[in-house]
Image: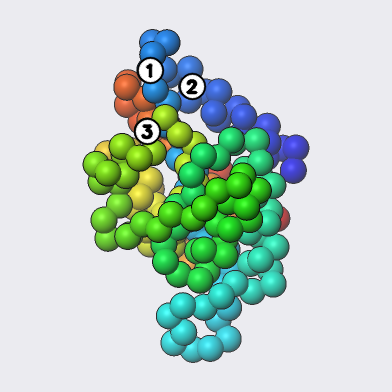
């Protein structure tokens, strides 16, 4: 656990150093793929998390405990909401829904500017969201069973930077 806290603090400090001016606003996005979903019912489009997934969701809350999360965004699916909830609860926050077909628009940028934001998505949207924030294609789609990626994207007046961490339970 301490290793993850160190990595997050290191990443945040590194990105903050890119802020050239004192009045530069820093926005940090933490993007994760939802935790392990229940695959028992074939064709279930909105499954809940498995026991392992619930444990991973709680682990994400532990990992992000020092990130001072201000807002939590998730898609409107059971698995993403369940993954996001422990972090939201830990920080006394509500869940905000976003449409993965309309991500990182002007309204989203305005609402999240200067904040630390957790975004929970899917194997085919988490990387796309990170790329959209970066303004370039840096990350490829991940496997549906990859639940351990943490994309940290920091936006300042100077531009956007990112790092990808692998966080296992």
Say which element carries label 3: loop
Q: Residues within 10 Å of mark 3 (few under 14, many from 20)?
A: some
Measured as percent of width and height from the top left, residue 115 is found at 45, 34
x 34%, y 52%: residue: 128
The mark nearer the N terminus, 2 or 3, is 2
The residue under the point 66% across, 41% down is 65
Q: Quadrant of the C terminus?
A: bottom right
Kindly check if marks 2 and 3 are in contact, taking CB atoms under 8 A apart as contact: no
Please state the horizontal and vertical placement of residue 84, each as a whole percent of the image. Answer: 55, 57
Cβ atoms at labels 2 and 1 below 8 Å apart: no
Q: Which residue is mark 3?
A: 113
From the viewer's perspective, tell me whether residue 95 is left or right of residue 141.
right
Q: In front here: 79 or 136? A: 79
Question: Does residue 112 sit above or below 167 in this rendering?
Answer: above
Q: Which mark is residue 16?
A: 2
Q: Residue at x 38, y 13 (%)?
A: 23
Real-space Cα distance between discs 1 and 3?
Answer: 11 Å
Give the camera-side residue of 139 and 134: 134
- SS class, disc 2: helix
Identity of the residue furthest to the bottom in this view: 42
- In the picture as drawn, the residue positioned furthest to the top comes out as 21
Q: Is residue 96 visible?
A: yes
The quadrant in which residue 96 appears is bottom left
Residue 155 position by quadrant: top left
């Amino acid at each position: 656990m301490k290793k993850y806290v160190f990595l997050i603090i290191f990443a945040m400090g590194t990105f903050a150093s890119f802020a050239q001016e004192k009045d530069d606003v820093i926005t940090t996005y933490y993007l994760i793929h939802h935790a392990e979903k229940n695959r028992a019912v074939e064709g279930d489009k909105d499954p809940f998390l498995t026991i392992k997934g619930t444990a991973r969701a709680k682990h994400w809350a532990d990992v992000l405990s020092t990130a001072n999360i201000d807002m939590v965004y998730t898609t409107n699916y059971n698995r993403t909401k369940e993954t996001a909830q422990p972090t939201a609860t830990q920080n006394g926050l509500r869940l905000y829904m976003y449409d993965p077909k309309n991500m990182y628009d002007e309204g989203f940028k305005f609402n999240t500017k200067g904040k630390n934001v957790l975004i929970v998505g899917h194997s085919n949207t988490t990387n796309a969201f990170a790329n959209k924030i970066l303004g370039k294609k840096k990350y490829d789609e991940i496997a549906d069973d990859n639940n351990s990626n943490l994309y940290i994207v920091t936006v300042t007046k100077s531009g956007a930077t990112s790092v990808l961490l692998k966080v296992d339970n």
